[in-house]
Amino acid sequence: MIDRRNALKLALGSAAALAAPTVWAQTAKPRTKIVFLGTKGGPRVSTGASNPANLVMVNDTPFVIDCGMGVSHQLASAGVPIPSIKYIFISHHHSDHNLEYGNLFYNAWAAGLSTPIHSFGPKGIEAMTTTYWELNKFDVETRIDDEGRPDPRKLLIAKDITEDGVVLQTADVKVTAFRTPHPPIVDNFAYKFETPDGTIVFSSDTAYNPKLAEFAKGADVLVHECMYMAAVDRLVVKTKNGATLKKHLLESHTTTEDVGRIAAAAGIKVLVLSHFVPGDDPLVTDDNWTEDVKKNFSGKIIVAKDLMELKLPV
Ligand SMILES: [Zn+2]
Ligand SMILES: [Zn+2]
């Protein structure tokens, strides 16, 4: 027998079930997407792909992951108003991931920002933020007085991440950090974004780390860095001032073959290769990037390009 309270519950339940698809159908564009803003690994700026940066959009809220040189320009090219950014995540303090951190915020302020941006990163991001305001004290204080702009120093709220765990929870998105080794750097975090349309994991730069597969277990999309061994020697020759660069690359990045191992162990739906090392060798083709991954992973593989979009659900 259904009493009055249970009848109400049933009615509410069926109303919710009916309402949900209607709301979704009214949404003209997908709620969640990834935009690969910069796909070239490493700090060297070149005419091809931009330095590392990614964007996750959920219900029109932009989350920026890493701020390599060019991130502001790439966001503009992707049609994202820079002042609409709400959150910035830095994976680690190699310059190809943080060099434009302060300037991205500055560019948001210059373009009309009046609401806070929260930033998260390994230990050092709070100090980097304070130092940025020392570096740009003259300009910002001049513009506050002269142009009547809000004080930007109150709008950038930085937080050092010191341990694994949830770093942000909004109505739509939960972001979890996971430490992964990138010798000699230990303060280095992969990030998991749990969205209404699926789970996305960004590997950060990382040495081959089977524990990352556990962190990414069952994710819909894994965006993983990669290194193509056959081209590493050419990259080292091109970089004229890095006597121990090859040693660094071998110790701190993941070969395409090992990326396949991670993807297979994690059981993800779609593997996106990005942060290419090398990222601007014209002799390396898309097939080169995937050939060794396929030895270990039989799922869908995407070779990311700058400004490519991936909509979720996948
Ligand atoms: Zn990097
Ligand atoms: Zn790095």
Image: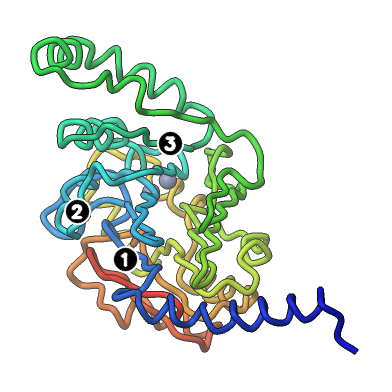
- Secondary structure, mark 3, is strand
Residue 151 percent location from the top left of the image: 27, 18
Which tag, 1 or 3, sits closer to the chain's start? 3
Q: Nearer the viewer, mark 3 or mark 2?
A: 3
Give the answer, above or below, for where 2 lies relative to 310: below
State the image quarter where residue 265 is shown.
Answer: bottom right
What residue is rendered at 22% in x and 45% in y?
82
The quadrant of the picture occupied by the N terminus is bottom right
Query: From this viewpoint, is residue 307 visible?
Result: yes
Q: Which residue is mark 3?
A: 118
Q: Looking at the picture, which amino acid does disc 2 mark?
A: Gln
Give the answer, above or below, for where 181 lies relative to 301: above
The residue sitting at the front extreme is 4
Q: In the shown orientation, is residue 21 left or right of residue 136?
A: right
- Numbered mark located on residue 74 in the image: 2
The quadrant of the picture occupied by the C terminus is bottom left
What residue is rendered at 34% in x and 74% in y?
27
Q: Which residue is mark 1?
A: 231
Residues under numbered marks 2 and 1 in contact, where contact means CB atoms less than 8 Å apart: no
- Residue situated in front as seen by the camera: 133 or 82: 82
Dot 3: few (<14), some (14–19), or many (≥20) neighbours within 10 Å?
some
Cα gap from disc 2 to disc 1, whole angstroms: 27 Å
Which tag, 3 or 2, sits closer to the chain's start? 2
